[in-house]
Image (tube, rainbow, N blue to C red):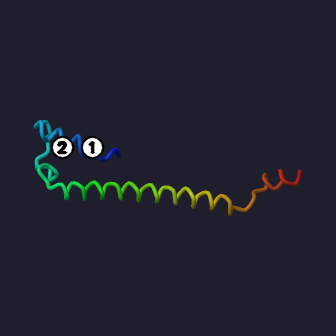
Amino acid sequence: MTKRHLVVVFLLLAASTGTASHPYADPLINASTTFQHRVMQMTSLEAETKRWERNMAIAAAAAARLKRKPTASTAAAKDS
């Protein structure tokens, strides 16, 4: 269960106990099962997208490091 799922569960519990201080009703309360399932799917896809983007950024940074020309200090170290 992701952090977002826990937040949704917490909000559902808070709304059911009357401790939520939101001026609007939570749309997930009394929502159909298909709607709740779709919200969970979208949350999962969002997390997957963020993970993919982070991994691509890490890979791009690693590729950029490999493409950099050697500096004078690294070239001198190779010559010795």
Q: Is residue 69 left or right of residue 18?
A: right
Residue 31 rendering spot, x and y as whole percentages: 14, 54
**Label placed on residue 24:** none
Q: Is 67 or 56 nearer to us in this picture?
A: 56
Tell me if residue 70 comes above or below residue 2 in the rendering: below
Residue 12 rendering spot, x and y as whole percentages: 18, 43
Tell me if residue 52 comes above or below residue 16 in the rendering: below
**Picture quarter with the N terminus:** top left
Residue 38 rendering spot, x and y as whole percentages: 25, 59
Q: What element carries label 1?
A: helix
Q: Is 37 or 26 nearer to us in this picture?
A: 37
Residue at x-position 48% and y-position 55%: 54
Q: What element carries label 2?
A: helix
Among all residues in the image, which is located at the extreme front? Answer: 33
Q: What residue type is labelled 2?
A: Leu
Among all residues in the image, which is located at the extreme right? Answer: 80
User: In which quadrant of the rendered view does residue 41 lie?
Assistant: bottom left
Q: In this view, does 9 lie to the left or right of 26?
A: right
**Mark 1 touches mark 2? (CB < 8 Å):** no
The residue pinned by badge 1 equals 7
Residue 76 rendering spot, x and y as whole percentages: 84, 53
Residue at x-position 17% and y-position 38%: 14
Marked residue nearer the N-terminal end (1 or 2): 1
Q: Is 56 or 67 nearer to us in this picture?
A: 56
**Counting other residues with Cα less than 10 Å from the Cα at mark 2, is it few (<14), some (14-19), or many (20 or more)?**
some
**Counting other residues with Cα less than 10 Å from the Cα at mark 1, is it few (<14), some (14-19), or many (20 or more)?**
few
Q: What residue type is labelled 1?
A: Val
Residue at x-position 11% and y-position 47%: 23
Distance Cα–Cα, label 1 vs label 2: 8 Å
The residue pinned by badge 2 equals 12
